[in-house]
């Protein structure tokens, strides 16, 4: 069923797109196709306020909503998107065999904190992660939540074979949860808030990060698009940095924009934003994250570590070497390009 859905998605994208943005004729050359996800981030602020459209008035800019990183990877393989908001685990998978997607990490949208978590449903009889043995858990496969679920089980000494893991998108998790079909689920905001209402948080991604398994939401750009339109990538990074600044300096305005995109109240949006970890634009070019043209940051090591974990879990065929992943971090113009 998932393959059928992916195929239908690609057909839909092909129908609404007009070929690769980095294509060979002038009609295609001024198009940017962005993939976004409905989680609280600066990316939603950029979309809501039309910041990229204002910065690049000569470009035709389209936004397409995706439910998970796995479907975004599928779209990149089909050359249906140019820029996307996607989790670090699906990026690690995308950079690894057999996918080997030609894209580059150009931005860190957020570091997962309490905005992603593993929740046990009330009445399931589960009090801790170890108690999940023999239980049914919903999670979007190939997502940061899936990576974190595997890490949480591993940390608690629970083998994946000892639980039943069901591949469900966040909205499908809510439906199955309501029916009582799941004992637990690992998901992210905004659906996570609904799970918490009738469940107990067993572990959040913030805790797993301190235990050496951090997850991030990243901005990635197709390598072909970055080579053909470096000025557009610069403009996109600048408006994403502008959104991070808004989250840091005017949380109310940021929450209003995010709330409009998620169809929730500004108060709820502000609460959701408070659960994520948002970097300052200047931090992105630090050694801890993207780095600079002179020295790629530790984000590359984080992605290799994530890939190694996925290989150990038999989710990918091979782990790319560090040098290969470092080339997949887009540091052109850093740190200067983020100043505005």
Image (spheres, helix red, strand yellow):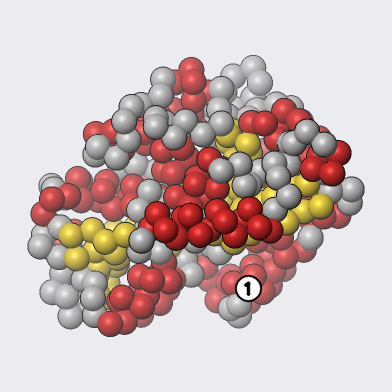
Residue 280 in view here: no
Q: Residue at x 55, y 48 (%)?
A: 75
Q: Quadrant of residue 249?
A: bottom right
Report x, y in % for residue 163: 15, 58
Query: 81 left or right of 152?
Result: right
Q: Nearer the viewer, residue 77 or 42?
A: 77
The tally of labels here is 1
Residue 331 in view here: yes
Q: Up-down: is 14 above or below 225? A: below
Q: Up-down: is 314 above or below 123? A: above
Mark 1 nearby-residue class (10 Å; few <14, some 14–19, many ≥20):
many
Q: Residue at x 64, y 70 (%)?
A: 261
Query: 177 left or right of 276?
Result: left
Q: Residue at x 89, y 48 (%)?
A: 58
Report x, y in % for residue 222: 63, 36
Q: Nearer the viewer, residue 289 or 183?
A: 183
Q: Which residue is mark 1?
A: 259
Q: Nearer the viewer, residue 99 or 154?
A: 99
SS at badge 1: helix
Q: Residue at x 66, y 74 (%)?
A: 260
Report x, y in % for residue 179: 28, 82
Query: 327 left or right of 170?
Result: right
Position of the N terminus by quadrant: bottom left
Q: Quadrant of residue 39?
A: bottom right
Report x, y in % for residue 307: 36, 33
Position of the C terminus by quadrant: top right
Q: Up-down: is 165 above or below 76? A: below
Query: 135 left or right of 220?
Result: left
Residue occupying the far right of the picture: 58
């Amino acid at each position: 069923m998932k393959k059928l859905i992916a195929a239908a998605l690609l057909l839909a994208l092909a129908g609404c797109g007009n070929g690769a943005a980095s294509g060979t004729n002038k009609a295609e050359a001024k198009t940017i196709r962005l993939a976004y996800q409905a989680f609280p981030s600066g990316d939603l602020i950029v979309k809501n306020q039309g910041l990229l459209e204002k910065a690049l008035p000569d470009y035709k800019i389209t936004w397409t909503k995706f439910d998970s990183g796995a479907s975004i990877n599928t779209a990149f393989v089909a050359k249906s998107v140019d820029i996307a908001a996607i989790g670090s685990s699906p990026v690690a998978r995308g950079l690894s065999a057999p996918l080997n997607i030609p894209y580059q990490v150009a931005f860190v949208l957020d570091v997962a904190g309490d905005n992603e978590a593993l929740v046990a449903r009330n009445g399931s009889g589960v009090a801790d992660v170890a108690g999940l043995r023999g239980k049914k858990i919903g999670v979007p496969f190939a997502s940061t939540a899936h990576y974190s679920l595997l890490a949480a089980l591993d940390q608690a000494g629970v083998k994946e074979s000892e639980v039943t893991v069901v591949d469900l998108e966040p909205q499908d998790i809510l439906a199955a949860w309501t029916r009582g079909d799941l004992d637990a689920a690992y998901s992210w905001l905004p659906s996570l808030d609904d799970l918490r209402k009738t469940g107990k948080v067993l572990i959040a991604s913030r805790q797993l990060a301190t235990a050496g398994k951090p997850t991030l939401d990243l901005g990635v750009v197709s390598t072909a698009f970055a080579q053909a339109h470096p000025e557009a990538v610069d403009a996109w990074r600048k408006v994403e940095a502008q959104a991070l600044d808004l989250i840091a300096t005017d949380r109310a305005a940021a929450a209003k924009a995010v709330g409009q995109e998620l169809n929730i109240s500004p108060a709820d949006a502000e609460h959701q934003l408070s659960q994520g970890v948002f970097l300052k634009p200047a931090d992105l070019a630090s050694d801890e994250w993207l780095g600079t043209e002179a020295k790629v940051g530790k984000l590359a090591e984080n992605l290799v570590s994530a890939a190694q974990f996925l290989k150990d879990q038999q989710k990918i065929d091979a782990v790319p070497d560090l040098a290969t992943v470092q080339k997949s971090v887009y540091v052109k113009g850093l740190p200067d390009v983020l100043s505005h």
